[in-house]
Image (tube, helix red, strand yellow):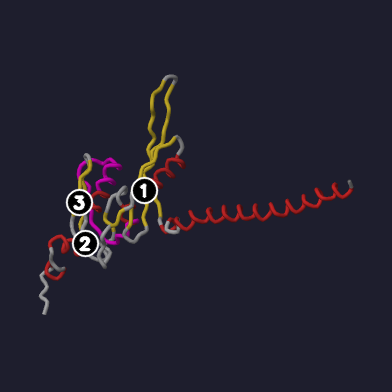
Amino acid sequence: MANEQEQPTEQTPEAAAKEQPAGQQKTSGRSDRSKRPDRDGDEVPELEDQVIYINRVAKVVKGGRRYGMTALVAVGDRHGRVGIGMGRATEVPIAINKGVEEAKRNLFTVPLTEAGTIPHEVVSKYGAGRIIIKPAVPGTGIIAGGPVRPLFELAGIKDVLSKSVGTDNCLNMVKAAAKGLQELSSPEQVAERRGMSVADIFGKKVQ
């Protein structure tokens, strides 16, 4: 009887010892999974965000008014990638975070010259907003209104001339500017569409 009672006591520590490595393997697997978002998000710290406009919206409901915040945010890396987004929430920080996430999903590439300006002039329209964007010589700086300036800065544009014609609504102005930047084409893209070389477009003679 004594021997039969000793066997369960000897097997119980062994079973507990076998369960510990299994638990360690599970925890190590979870730590590996937690590192995957960090690897996928290596490019996120390179992006900079800037709040362009914050607006308070009131909705009349039964019993009073319900206020909401709208934030227009621009995100870019100052090397040709930029995007805009708008977030809505009852609090300003939450609205800004939503705007940043939407701007990251709407990133697009702006073709820039070696001098840091745009390759050609463009006229863009969005809603009642109309904006004219022209390239500028080095040293000119960013000549743009308040809502559009952060978009050019985060895109990496150093010299540019712009003029807003029409509405003074910040949302329409910024979206018109973003639409104009998306319509820009580099000399290589134009040459590919025409089936020519870049030298032929600029009229250079190849000897």
- x, y percent for residue 85: 35, 45
Q: CA distance from mark 2 to mark 3?
A: 18 Å
What is the crowding at mark 3: few (fewer than 14 residues within 10 Å), some, or many (at least 20)? some
Q: Can residue 53 be seen by looking at this rendering? A: no
Amino acid type, residue under disc 1 in the picture: Ala
Amino acid type, residue under disc 2 in the picture: Ser
What is the crowding at mark 2: few (fewer than 14 residues within 10 Å), some, or many (at least 20)? some
Q: Is residue 26 above or below residue 56?
A: below
Residue farthest bottom in this picture: 207
Q: Earlier in the sequence, mark 1 or mark 2?
A: 1
Instruction: Answer left or right for 189 relative to 44.
Output: left
The secondary structure type at the circle numbered 1 is helix
Q: Which residues are magenta?
A: 154-176
Residue marked by disc 3 = 132
Q: Earlier in the sequence, mark 1 or mark 3?
A: 1
Residue marked by disc 2 = 186
Nearer the observer, 16 or 91: 16
- x, y percent for residue 175: 27, 45
